[in-house]
Image (spheres, coloured by chain):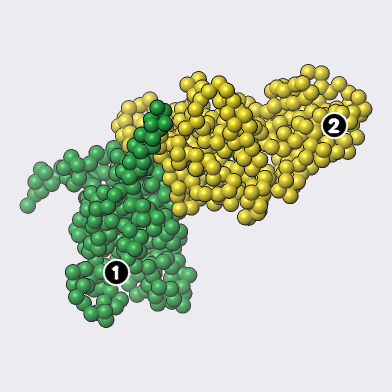
Chain colours: A yellow, B green
Amino acid sequence: MLPRTDRPVLMQGNEACAVGAVDAGVRFFAGYPITPSSEIAEILAEMLPRVGGKFIQMEDEIASMAAVIGASLAGMKAMTATSGPGFSLKQENIGYAAMAEVPCLVVQVQRAGPSTGLPTSPAQGDVMQARWGTHGDHPVVVMCPSSVREVYDLTVRCLNWSEVLRVPAVLIMDEVVAHMRENVVLPDPAELEVWERPRPTLPPGDPSFRAYRPGPDDVPPMAAFGDGYRYHVTGLHHDERGYPVHEGAEAGRLVERLCRKVERRAKEICRVEWVAEGYRGPEPPPGFPGSRPAGVVVAYGATARSAEAACALARADGREAILLRLVTIWPFPDEAVVRAAELVGPEGELLVVEMNLGQLSREVERAAAGRTRVRHWGLVTGELPAPREIADEINRAGGSRR
Amino acid sequence: MSPSPLETDLRSLELSLLRSDRMPHIWCPGCGHGIVLGAIVRALAAKIAAGKLDPSKVVVVSGIGCAARAAGYLNFDGVHTTHGRAIAFATGIKLARPELKVLVITGDGDLAAIGGNHFIHAARRNVGLTVVCFNNSIYGMTSGQYSPMTPREAKATTAPYGHIERPFDLCGLALACGATYVARGATYYAARLTDYVSAGLDHDGFAFVEAVTQCPTYFGRRNRMSRGVDMLRWQKEHAVPLSRAASAAPEELAGKFTVGVFRDVDEPEYTREYDRIIELARRQAAGEGK
């Protein structure tokens, strides 16, 4: 296992993910080998038994998602890791976890698709799948890191939200962030903020116990199998006892609650980072925009790293441009996008840069709601956009000279 | 003769293992699934009554289909999973908490078609699960499409001209994959079926019990056995005990099925093998720390 020191350690994103997971209390991993996520499985195969945890390489992607849900029902913090093709296969069981309210973490290291695609090349083509990949209206929490240290932090945050909301969480990376090596200093695990799923307050056997009776936060406390509550779990629409129901109004109430429990916490879940010259923070940089027209580049994952450099290049070219980096993808950070749109106004623009042909750009457009122009620029060549390419795109908007 | 107090106690214990608030069940008149569920309840109740099993430590896992609804009727921790995936969910539960007795209830479509991959690999790993397959040779929940267990020539909604595929020998498949307890019973022989389920629950390793059961509604009616009793009679006429099958000529066994215990051996169970890995990993980590 990694020695913990105050000195920086050189590690890749996938490694930081595995370490973050164990630090946050993950004690079960089931997975299936797939590039570019396999290092997570390999590292956890070594780490988990050392802390009394369990690792299993299942016979396929579907089985690994199923085993993760089973382990979580038995009370363990559980996760899997995969890439596009495997993520597609896992979708039915991810929906099951949403419906049966089973906390779990799915790490999705995106590679270029569709289908088998470019297995070792980066892409961001699965961000809509992370939201809508499984059928039916359902909740999900999705976060996207841009650096190795952030992989660690967001692994912990995804697990935290998954546990307290009893919702599947997806840590969505791209191949660049997963395989990139950076020097990082990791926090002391003892000082880490780790959240646990709510537990029933009623003792086992209490006749008034209802496995799916929600608390005031719309989340039902969760008993572990084997603890004596003897309750039923199903992917069918169900009542508070967990028994199947056919009645439409009751079914509708369930789906509404499932979605509401995440929506009502959206403000806390949603995180963004604004990046300008000499500035980095959760709020827009003071004094922006100094002149108009101005642009905000919206990006996430590895693309945000290029976009940050591109903004500096564009500023050198005399454009007023800053970066809005999305950290939480779902629920979508509407509020930050609205602020960006209002800041640049009708004569400015939001340039959404993604490694796809336009996915989150449509969400940006929806949130901006006509306050400004929203433009998408992306690559699907399996290459990370270069800063110069993005800067040229910023310049094309025709921003003012400083 | 009235039942003895002991029998009454056992009977009320058996009833307490069923969720009366889930009744009536969804199964059709003449369906054999209640007989298989009865065998499961009797096997579990006897162990609980004997103090050999804590009902709080039993988890019932099922997939999708008529048989899979049994999980909801049993008064234990239970999970009615996605179609075909019961064994994979169960593997996660068992590995997370090996002290649990994990019973998988599945049907022939759930197990042998969509869930075939999980079945063969759990058997290969020898995970400590007891898998009971309610084999009625048809997809009943979806109204009578052919399954991997539908015999040749039989009619099904998706085989209106007669079926051309060969069915699996499920017990043969389990044996080939390394299952360490394998038995086949039938609803006509309900008491013997209880014995197989009971032995499967006691077994330390992957136990597979195939329960041949009847679906008069969707199999029988299309195949000239429209009542449950017709299908039970068919079972009686076609079941051959393993002991007799061993010395029978191949032509005597044509169209018949064998019942009995095909294998009952001890081999290292998966979750305990994994405990060894934990010990080894911890020892190595401690060594590194020196």
Q: Label 2 is found on which chain of the structure? A: A
Q: In this view, does A249 lie to the left or right of A184?
A: left
Residues beneath discs 1 and 2 located on the same chain? no
Residue type of the residue flagged with mark 1 = Met
Residue at image position (18%, 72%) is B244
Q: Which amino acid does label 2 sit on?
A: Ala
Residue A303 x %, y %: 72, 38
Residue A332: give its label.
none
Q: To which residue does mark 1 refer?
A: B231
Residue A178 at what x, y percent from top left? 61, 39
Q: Label 2 belongs to which residue?
A: A314
Q: Nearer the viewer, mark 1 or mark 2?
A: 2
Of residue A276 and residue B57, the one placed in the foreground of this image is A276
Residue at horizontal 11%, vertical 44%? B6
Place of residue B280 in the rendered image (x, y in percent of width and height, measured from the top left): 35, 38
Compared to residue B83, the image places residue A199 above or below, namely: above
Would residue B155 be found to the left or right of residue A227 on screen? right
User: Quarter of the image containing the C terminus of chain A?
Assistant: top right
- Residue B278 seen in this snapshot: yes
Q: Which residue lies furthest to the top in this view?
A: A286
Query: Tag 2: Cα neighbours inside 10 Å, few (<14), some, or many (≥20)?
Result: many
Q: In which quarter of the image is residue A378?
A: top right
Q: Which residue is more in the foreground, B217 or A389?
A: A389
Residue occupying image coordinates x 66% and y 40% = A176
Q: What element does badge 2 sit on?
A: helix
Do residues under tags 1 and 2 come within 8 Å of each other at their CB atoms?
no
Q: Which of B29 and B248 is in front in this view?
A: B248
Note whether residue B73 is visible: no
Q: Mark 1 lies on which chain?
A: B
Residue B212 point in image, percent of width and height: 30, 63
